[in-house]
Amino acid sequence: MSKPQAIKANKQSKKRRAKNRMYKGKMRAIIREINSVQTKDEAIKLLPKVYSNVDKLAIKGIIHKNTAARYKSRLTKLANKLT
């Protein structure tokens, strides 16, 4: 039989995994949204939303801070490349 600590740790990790997956899913949805935009103006309007979302995930430890910086950099480049 499992120890109570192991059972509790397992419950907690399942909860954390579900939350982290939800947050990452939201981030991916926002990134898909900015990737589907056709004009530079629309993309630049969406950038602050993306930045804040990615930064929140980095602060919470869901993604690494360098990963957050990489996402932001690539999306900024993409937005600036649009016409």
Image (cartoon, rainbow, N blue to C red):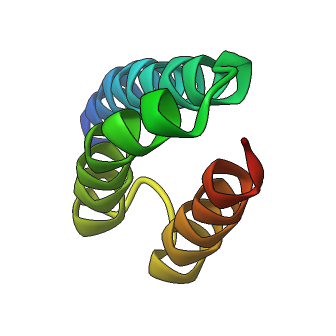
| Image quadrant assignment for residue 39 | top right
Direction from residue 32 to residue 22 in the image, left or right: left
Q: Is residue 3 visible?
A: no
Residue at 73% x, 44% y: name it.
Answer: 82
- In the current view of this chain or complex, which residue is farthest to the front? 83
Quarter occupied by the C terminus: top right
Direction from residue 10 to residue 4 in the image, left or right: left
Direction from residue 67 to residue 1 in the image, left or right: left
- How far across and how far down the image is residue 8, in percent? 26, 31
- How far across and how far down the image is residue 69, in percent? 52, 76
- How far across and how far down the image is residue 62, in percent? 42, 53
Above or below for 45 versus 57: above
Above or below for 79 versus 1: below
- In the current view of this chain or complex, which residue is farthest to the bottom? 66
Q: Nearer the viewer, residue 26 or 11?
A: 26
Q: Is residue 59 visible?
A: yes
Residue at 43% x, 20% y: name it.
Answer: 26
Residue at 34% x, 24% y: name it.
Answer: 19
Above or below for 9 versus 22: below
| Image quadrant assignment for residue 38 | top right
Q: Nearer the viewer, residue 58 or 44?
A: 44
Figure disc tally: 0
Above or below for 62 versus 30: below
Q: Nearer the viewer, residue 7 or 12?
A: 12
Residue at 42% x, 18% y: name it.
Answer: 22
- How far across and how far down the image is residue 30, in percent? 48, 24
